[in-house]
Amino acid sequence: MSMFGNLKYVNAYFRDDERRSILTYWKENDASDEIIDIEISVDDEQSYNELLHYTTIDQIHENTWNYIKESEEAFKETVVEIAKERGWLVNMDDGGTSDFNKILVDIVFDEFNEELHKEKLFFLKINIFEKDFVKKCTDKDLKKNLRRATTALEAVRAAIEIFDASQKTSSPDTAD
């Protein structure tokens, strides 16, 4: 007796990294939209061999690859959508959003709360240190001021000092 009876094969892919478990999808008939899923173990030789009457092992591997890629893409899309909804993602090509600009102004000028802003300050400093003008700066005191900044305002102020110093050293001196 057939495990799948009169079911029509739809798809199958491996569920695990070890490739020991296969999730299969079936329909009762062409008119039905209902999909039935049946898990098959590769170790269950009878079920596994019966499945191979409907598809090939190569096709199952290809389906698995496609499933993983589609799942990754769907995950990325969901994360981006959530980030957009919560204002965590900003498209700077269109000038950013007023939310982004408000967040920037708030972090720099509002009263600094170490508990709430410590991580933001850390990432702000990392981003500042990644700028070429900071990397090229040889003034250890200016860099020390940036490292020791305890608020976003102090970090931005230190970055501006480094930037101004870099402009003076990169511009030819016109005074005689």
Image: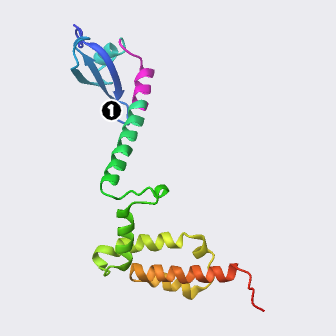
Residue matched to label 1: 15
Tell me which corner region of the image, top left, top right, bottom left or bottom right, holds residue 34: top left
Q: Residues within 10 Å of mark 1 (few under 14, many from 20)?
A: some
What segment carries the magenta color? 54-65
The percent coordinates of residue 113 (x first, y second) are 29, 79
Residue 68 x %, y %: 39, 35
Q: Is residue 37 rendered to the left or right of residue 168?
A: left
Residue located 49% across and 69% down the image: 127
- Residue 72: image location, x then y, percent: 39, 41
How many numbered marks does the figure carry?
A: 1
Residue sitting at x 21%, y 15%:
32
**Residue at the image position 39 percent from the left and 77 percent from the top:** 108
Q: 173 left or right of 92?
A: right
Residue 158 point in image, percent of width and height: 50, 83
Position of the N terminus by quadrant: top left
Seen in the picture, residue 13 relative to 165 is either above or below; the reply is: above
Three-letter amino acid code of the residue under disc 1? Arg
